[in-house]
Image (cartoon, rainbow, N blue to C red):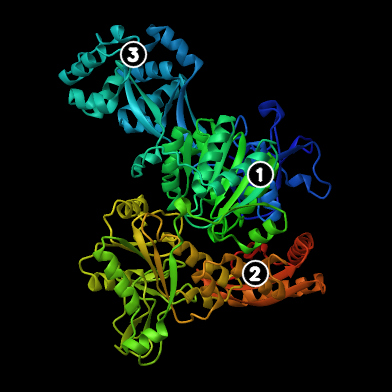
Amino acid sequence: MVSQPTSTQGPFLEVALSLPISRNFYYQSDPQRWGHLLPGQRVLVPFQNRKLTGFVVKTLEQLPPDFPKETVRQVIDLLDEMPLISEDLFRLSEWAADYYFAGLGEVLKACLPPKSHVQSRRQVQITLAGLDACAHPDQLGALSAEARNMLYRLAERRVLKWSQITREGTISCRAAEKLVRLGWAESRQKLAHAAGQRTQLSVALTASIQERTALESLTDAQLRVLAALTSNESPVLAADLQKQCRVSLSTLRVLERKGVVRLTEQSISRDPFLALPAHEGPAIRSLTTEQEEALRLIRNHSTRLEYFPVLLHGVTGSGKTEIYLNLIEEKLRQGQDSLILMPEIGLTPRIAAEFRARLGETVAILHSALGEGERRDEWWRIRSGQAKVAVGTRSAIFAPLSNLGLIIVDEEHDPSYKQQERPRYHARDLALVLGKMRKAVVVLGSATPAIETCYNAHEGKYSLAQLSQRVHSRPLPSVKLVDMRLDFQESSRHSILSQELRQAIQVRLERKEQVLILLNRRGFSAFVLCRSCGETFQCRNCSISLAYHRGKNCLLCHYCGFQQKPPKQCGRCGSEYLYYLGEGTEKVETLFSKAFPQARIARLDRDTASRKNAHSRILHEVQSGQVDILVGTQMISKGHDFPNVTLVGVLLADHSLSLPDFRSAERTYQLLSQMSGRAGRGQLAGEVLIQTFAPEHYCLKFVAQHDYKGFYQKELRFRQFMHYPPFASLACILVRDRNLDEALRIVQALGQIVDQQTDTTFRVLGPTQSPLARLKQQYRFQILIKSKSRSKLREILKRSLKEGEARGIDLRKVSVDIDPVSVM
């Protein structure tokens, strides 16, 4: 379809397209056809030589003075009678697009379920002439039996999908085309939402069966179907009818063409909870004194129906989840909705199952591991008001809850709340913005809060509720740092498993207790080295070594997914002396199987959890005692409650301390503290052994002492001295291009522009090569900007990007990361 030329008269629409661009576009609307359009409604518009889905931002009577009116094109079609995106979520999307330098269409697209795009479908619809012909049977004499029955079906159903007609065979297609040629039907293209909706087929007798069955004799199989339907008053599922009458679907289709039955598709709502392991009953636990005080603090503000952010700082095992449940139950009694954000997909199903057992079917779950149809169905349950509690990962911040009164961000410190691709939003920060818009209570829960969050609480920006004790007065586990340098001196051998940890595991196995082992590195070996020339095997797309995965028998890049077969000789010197160095979880699992042959060992990392529901299945096996030792990455470190785990071992604990990131110590402390919290959560005491080559590092010492306050104070002094958050706002300009020279040209030009814009109150680091210098075939350079004023920082960025665009810089190759959680 070619868009018609437009006039210079309004109304005009400002439209946001779902593209990685920050500007909006203008189109002319047809008020006689669609009336006044509202923000958030979707329209189909021409863009270059394509048709794209766009979101209405606002209606204008006049175009901006600097916009060339002759370039304005007409809207092709209206896709929503009413906006699918609420006014609150639209305002939140506008805020996020502006703050994170993203396209509004990109953010609005994140508010909708998957498969919400539009596609064109051919349909056949009866015309008025066709209806008139049905009323005068004498006009149908020239029609074949197939065409006549097709006309009857169209008269009953008005519209038939062309895909359905083609499934019935060539005869049905010819019959439909004959009716179109006669003018008794019309073929048209209808824009339809690819909703991914699951349907089931039902069968019912037609109202006019007595008139038509006499025209043709029925087979024995068809008579069995007729008899079964006659004995049923309501429609019957086609699958059940096929089984009962021992017939195929084609038999039912033939009966439909003869006008004996009517086949109808009915939508089915998919329930993702059916695939989860059964959870215990809805037990309501008694509260500790600290829990009651925390609830009282939150309730006092909640009754005022005003925005109230609170940091719930509780040690692992202190009962934060029970506080969440109490707050949600109170909101449900008040008729308000609740949103619970979790950092990991693996946590979401377990917590959601616990909430479903306690709160019933009012709970919905949203995360990317669900099938697209499941996510769509859960989204519509929330939007229709059937579900009042939404549990999900970062994208659930856009859940369409209509009366939001409570937002909970569990493990608020977790970096997975930050989206690493456009739009680069932080779900925790958006939760605070949304809470302010909705005047809702926002609870940030963590045993190891982010430095910025803790600072805001101590500065009075957030209220602070603390849980310093575990429930039932259970002690925190004892934590010991195992010096691997001394272990090597004593054993005269290098091993990833120290003698002390080996003996501790053996003791737990003899006691029938469980063990968790953390190694935050996947695969069998970290890299492959040629001993003759020192060559390592690099990814062809990224500046990173390939890891060996023995299960898949391949060398794999953990960033872009590139893989190749393990080499037999060095590609540089031809040597066959290739060494597979460094340990990953796959290798540790193998080593433990040999060291403890009597133990039942499982592994949980991205490789073993790649299949749907595999993560939940493995955790359920641990929970039910079917696993003695669980080896895993950071996926096993948070949120899990295994009462029989009495020992936690951490391998290569100081690995993350060497990363070139100012948050490396904070990330290490959080990971090790969370992992330590998995031990001793039941009746038995817990022990944690952390293997390290740097036991003198302050981060590890504070972990061993369970001293978050001491770590926070030391880290805060470092941040203040180095002008890092929370004492400065941070932004990273990242330039990516497949051509090295082009990437260098752009980043150098941007660097000059930024230097011209900034003054002595800003600190600019770069331009410089990113720590990951090449990723997914793109060379990467970055500029890091620090400023005490967030508003001035954003203003500098806006002016720099505008100036860069004026100088011919392609901004599609430039991305801005506001408040980055990683500078890798």
- Identify the residue at image location x=36%, y=44%: 276
Label 2, label 3: how many angstroms apart (C-alpha)? 77 Å
Whole-percent x, y for residue 20 in the image: 62, 55
Decide: few, some or many residues near mark 3? Use Cα within 10 Å; few <14, some 14-19, many ≥20.
some
Q: Quadrant of the C terminus?
A: bottom right
Element marked by disc 1 = helix
Whole-percent x, y for residue 528 in the image: 37, 81
Whole-percent x, y for residue 161 in the image: 42, 29
Figure quadrant of residue 768:
bottom right
Q: Write down the residue under mark 1.
A: 435
Q: Is residue 592 above or below residue 389?
A: below
Figure quadrant of residue 210:
top left
Q: Write down the residue under mark 2.
A: 713
Q: Is residue 575 above or below residue 801?
A: below
Decide: few, some or many residues near mark 2? Use Cα within 10 Å; few <14, some 14-19, many ≥20.
few
Figure quadrant of residue 786:
bottom right
Q: Is residue 615 left or right of residue 413?
A: left
Front residue (pair 820, 632): 632
Amino acid at the residue labelled 3: Thr
Q: Earlier in the sequence, mark 2 or mark 3?
A: 3
Label 3, label 1: how many angstroms apart (C-alpha)? 53 Å
Decide: few, some or many residues near mark 1? Use Cα within 10 Å; few <14, some 14-19, many ≥20.
many
Amino acid at the residue labelled 1: Gly
Q: Nearer the viewer, mark 2 or mark 1?
A: 2
Whole-percent x, y for residue 265 in the image: 38, 27
Element marked by disc 2 = helix
Q: Quadrant of the N terminus?
A: top right
Q: Earlier in the sequence, mark 3 or mark 1?
A: 3
Q: Is residue 647 above or below residue 206?
A: below
Q: Earlier in the sequence, mark 2 or mark 1?
A: 1
Label 2, label 1: how many angstroms apart (C-alpha)? 29 Å
